[in-house]
DNA sequence: TGCGGACAACTTGCATGGAAGATGAGCGGA
DNA sequence: TCCGCTCATCTTCCATGCAAGTTGTCCGCA
């Protein structure tokens, strides 16, 4: 892995686990030192994080970690709604994706039973991503990626603090996967809209 | 303007006017020299262009300018369709945006009459952007930006080579603006879908 | 006490250079 | 003729260093 990639992964990890919390000021030099690399690759990684909306770079001052706002959560879920509804309507028409999704839901239930919270979050993310990828539209997939990080920044603590939410997520995922397997686009659309609506409420409670 | 911004603007200009054509290999060093700056800021600009899908960086080799493919054009217009339909349905419900848009269409007609092709392209772009910005959803606006550049790379030559297309664009823009002013979301949706469909056909003919 | 200026300690911006990977030309041998 | 090897030349990668902007502190003065 190249130095900028390592720096990027390092920063994201800390954005998602809360080490880099909203309002914090990050210094290229410090991060570079802790990764035993120079500031150049760290700077590249921070530029990318800025593009993705996680930090804001102030010239000659440093990188401010942006807090996740309620408005941002709403924007993210509206955007995801647009993209995911389109994706499940497509997938629901063909039905090819359905069985694979149902297996993913089973795997999520297993992770939850084992208490693997982080892996559960990742599996949640994969599930949604898989649906969008199935459209075969790489631009849409890229646009969607912009809307996936915010829930991850809020989500890990969120799931632990919202009792019963994880079980609810699994039930809602199963409804989506079943509707797709049944080739029922209208049901798939309704299931996605309900799921995202509940997700928004849970995330808003978390901040 | 900072050095990386200058480099980025320089490269985009050449991507859009065709100087950097698909298949070309760009060298950081050459660009840096022609801009009288070092390679560092040029590298940053190329990274951004890569993220936006215009070039692909090959380690230790250089930056390949990616040609615009038919698949990409289709992806772009599907994505724009999703976002713009949502935006005009919102705008069409309130009607507040309508009058401003009609003025923009008049301005476009004036630019066309004066033969200002480049400004016409920019005005076209602004018109669509304005509708999306009106949603007030900054994430959606950012996602939309990813889908705006491709038509610009094809578009300038396209408009000149597709006789009557510019007049058609103006008529279609007027239909969209009028539907929004009339607070008629269904008509607005239909007008946007027709416009994007025609745009796709024109762009596909151009490559 | 409250204000203003100097300065020290931080930060990044970006130019530069050495290291090293990728490529293609040209040569030697089968 | 054709294959494979060597090597010159191209490229980027990223460490480093200097220049310069920003900030907060501290001191002197009213």
Image (tube, coloured by chain):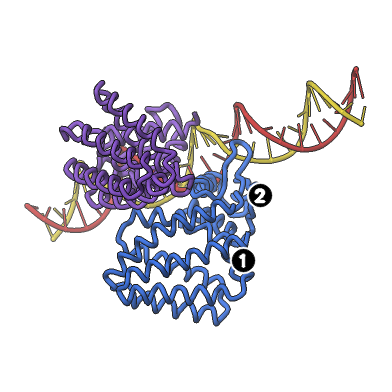
Chain colours: A blue, B purple, C yellow, D red
Kindly tell me whether residue B30 is visible in this rendering.
Answer: no
B199 sits to left or right of C30: right
Kindly tell me whether residue B120 is visible in this rendering.
Answer: yes
Q: Which of B18 and B84 is in front in this view?
A: B84
Distance, label 1 to label 2, CA atoms, is 18 Å
Q: Earlier in the sequence, mark 1 or mark 2?
A: 2
Examine the rendered structure and indicate whether residue A9 appears above or below residue B43: below
Instruction: Classify residue A14 by image quadrant.
Output: bottom right
Image quarter hosting the C terminus of chain B: top left
What label sits on residue A24 in the rendered view?
A: 2
Q: Nearer the viewer, residue B182 or C19?
A: B182
B44 sits to left or right of A204: left
| Mark 2 residue crowding within 10 angstroms, few (<14) / some (14–19) / many (20+) | some
| Mark 1 residue crowding within 10 angstroms, few (<14) / some (14–19) / many (20+) | some
Provide the residue designation for mark 1. Answer: A157
**Residue D5 location, x and y as percent?**
26, 55
């Amino acid at each position: 892995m190249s130095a900028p990639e390592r720096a990027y992964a390092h920063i994201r990890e800390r954005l998602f686990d809360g080490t880099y919390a909203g309002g914090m000021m990050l210094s290229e030099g410090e991060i570079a030192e802790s990764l035993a690399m120079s500031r150049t690759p760290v700077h590249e990684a921070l530029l990318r994080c800025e593009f993705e909306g996680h930090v804001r770079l102030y010239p000659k001052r440093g990188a401010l970690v942006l807090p996740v706002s309620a408005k941002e959560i709403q924007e993210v879920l509206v955007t995801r709604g647009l993209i995911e509804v389109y994706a499940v309507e497509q997938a629901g028409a063909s039905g090819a994706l359905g069985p694979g999704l149902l297996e993913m839901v089973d795997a999520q239930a297993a992770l939850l039973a084992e208490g693997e919270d982080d892996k559960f979050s990742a599996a949640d993310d994969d599930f949604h991503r898989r649906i969008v990828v199935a459209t075969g539209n790489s631009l849409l997939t890229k646009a969607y990626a912009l809307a996936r990080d915010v829930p991850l920044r809020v989500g890990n603590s969120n799931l632990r603090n919202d009792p019963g939410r994880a079980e609810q997520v699994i039930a809602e995922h199963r409804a989506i996967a079943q509707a797709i397997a049944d080739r029922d686009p209208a049901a798939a659309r309704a299931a996605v809209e309900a799921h995202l609506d509940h997700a928004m409420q849970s995330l808003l409670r978390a901040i």
